[in-house]
Image: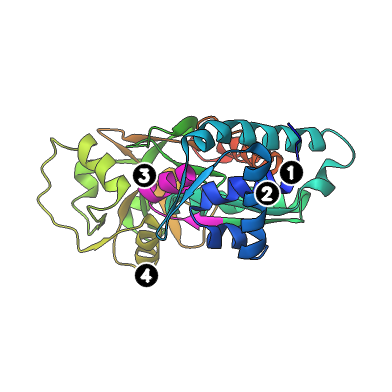
């Protein structure tokens, strides 16, 4: 067989699979849609097979394409790693790195990793998708994100979870709040104060409801929000306290916010890195993962 295609054709094929359409794939690899179509046609012609089934509504892999995809991904990922081992690795790391992250980790935790990464690899642009746990999982599964940072839950079968840290829930309050002077507080005591709760659509709310199923709370929350980051803004405004994961709190001293350990019971969640099974991370993604794995040691209580 005469191999009449190149790496750009393979990248075009992978982009179409990841993006689910020719239009989005063309935008992702920055070529015209007609040029992308020619690359796919060239690849299919060289192989003598149909890799993609195209209809007016969607693009899907053929049976042959489904078997061919893992080999293409492995080849392209191995090439990235090989290029990294020669010459100036930093200079080779260009383009965009897309990371999906739950808002509680995106607010204070992730900026430290982005700052460290940008200092070493200024030519790589970071695209941060701050979204719910379900949306983070979906972004990684579809290939929209290179990897994700989220907590354990109902993950798709094609998602691999790698633990990053186990963190506890704490009370977030203003520094002038009476609880701020305490080393720890029980859940029952915390709920006697004005507090803000998370909505039922929140993944954190599910974790807390399961952990506190036997607790009877007499006082209702004064306000409900969907995201931990919103809770922190409401707390800063003086609307009460809230139970939040410790990763959502600022590192070091904050001019307004304080955190207090929650006990009886101590509730934790496991944060980790989400990857698509069978897919090797790009060199840039591998380096970013290394940086975020260094951060937990700087978190209070870890």
Give left or right: position of 249 versus 213: right
Q: Give the class, few, some or many, for how many residues have Cα within 10 Å of label 1's Cα (few <14, many ≥20).
A: some
**Which residue, given by chain and number where applicable, does mark 3 sit on?**
170
| Horizontal and vertical percent position of residue 204 | 31, 46
Please tell me whether residue 297 is drawn above or below residue 181 in the rendered image. Answer: above
Mark 1 or mark 4: whose residue is earlier in sequence: 1
Secondary structure beneath label 1? loop
Give the number of marks.
4
In three-dimensional space, the C-alpha distance between marks 1 and 4, rounded to whole angstroms, equals 60 Å
Cβ atoms at labels 1 and 2 below 8 Å apart: yes
In three-dimensional space, the C-alpha distance between marks 2 and 3, rounded to whole angstroms, equals 57 Å
Cβ atoms at labels 4 and 3 below 8 Å apart: no
**Which residue, given by chain and number where applicable, does mark 2 sit on?**
42
Q: Nearer the viewer, residue 210 or 276?
A: 276
Q: Residue at x 69, y 43 (%)?
A: 284
Mark 2 or mark 4: whose residue is earlier in sequence: 2
Q: Specify the quadrant of the image occupied by residue 234.
A: bottom left
Secondary structure beneath label 4? loop
Mark 2 or mark 3: whose residue is earlier in sequence: 2
Q: Nearer the viewer, residue 92 or 200?
A: 92
In three-dimensional space, the C-alpha distance between marks 1 and 3, rounded to whole angstroms, equals 56 Å
The label nearer to you, 1 versus 4, is 1
**Which residue, given by chain and number where applicable, does mark 4 sit on?**
237
Give left or right: position of 17 versus 282: left
Q: Nearer the viewer, residue 220 or 137?
A: 137
The region drawn magenta spans: 128-142
Give left or right: position of 71 versus 229: right
């Amino acid at each position: 067989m005469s191999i009449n295609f190149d790496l750009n054709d393979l990248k075009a094929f992978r982009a179409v699979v990841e993006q689910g359409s020719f239009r989005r794939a063309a935008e992702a690899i920055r070529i015209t849609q007609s040029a992308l179509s020619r690359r796919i046609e060239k690849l299919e012609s060289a192989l003598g097979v149909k890799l993609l089934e195209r209809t007016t509504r969607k693009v899907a892999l053929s049976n042959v394409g489904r078997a061919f995809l893992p080999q293409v991904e492995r080849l392209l990922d191995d090439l990235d790693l090989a290029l990294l081992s020669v010459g100036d690795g930093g200079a080779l790391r260009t383009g965009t790195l897309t990371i999906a992250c739950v808002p509680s980790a995106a607010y204070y935790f992730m900026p430290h990793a982005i700052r460290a990464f940008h200092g070493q690899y200024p030519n790589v642009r970071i695209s941060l998708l701050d979204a719910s746990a379900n949306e983070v999982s979906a972004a990684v599964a579809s290939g929209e994100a290179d990897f994700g940072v989220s907590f354990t839950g109902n993950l798709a079968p094609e998602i691999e979870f790698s633990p990053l840290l186990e963190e506890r829930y704490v009370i977030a309050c203003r520094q002038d709040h009476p609880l701020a002077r305490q080393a720890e507080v029980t859940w029952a005591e915390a709920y006697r104060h004005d507090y803000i709760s998370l909505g039922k659509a929140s993944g954190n709310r599910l974790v807390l409801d399961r952990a506190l199923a036997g607790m009877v709370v007499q006082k209702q929350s004064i306000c409900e929000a969907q995201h931990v980051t919103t809770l922190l803004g409401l707390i800063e405004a003086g609307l009460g306290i809230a139970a939040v994961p410790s990763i959502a709190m600022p590192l070091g001293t904050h001019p307004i916010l304080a955190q207090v350990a929650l006990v009886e019971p101590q509730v934790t969640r496991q944060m980790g890195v989400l990857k698509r099974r069978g897919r090797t991370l790009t060199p840039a993604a591998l380096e970013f993962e290394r940086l975020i794995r260094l951060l937990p040691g700087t978190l209070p209580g870890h």
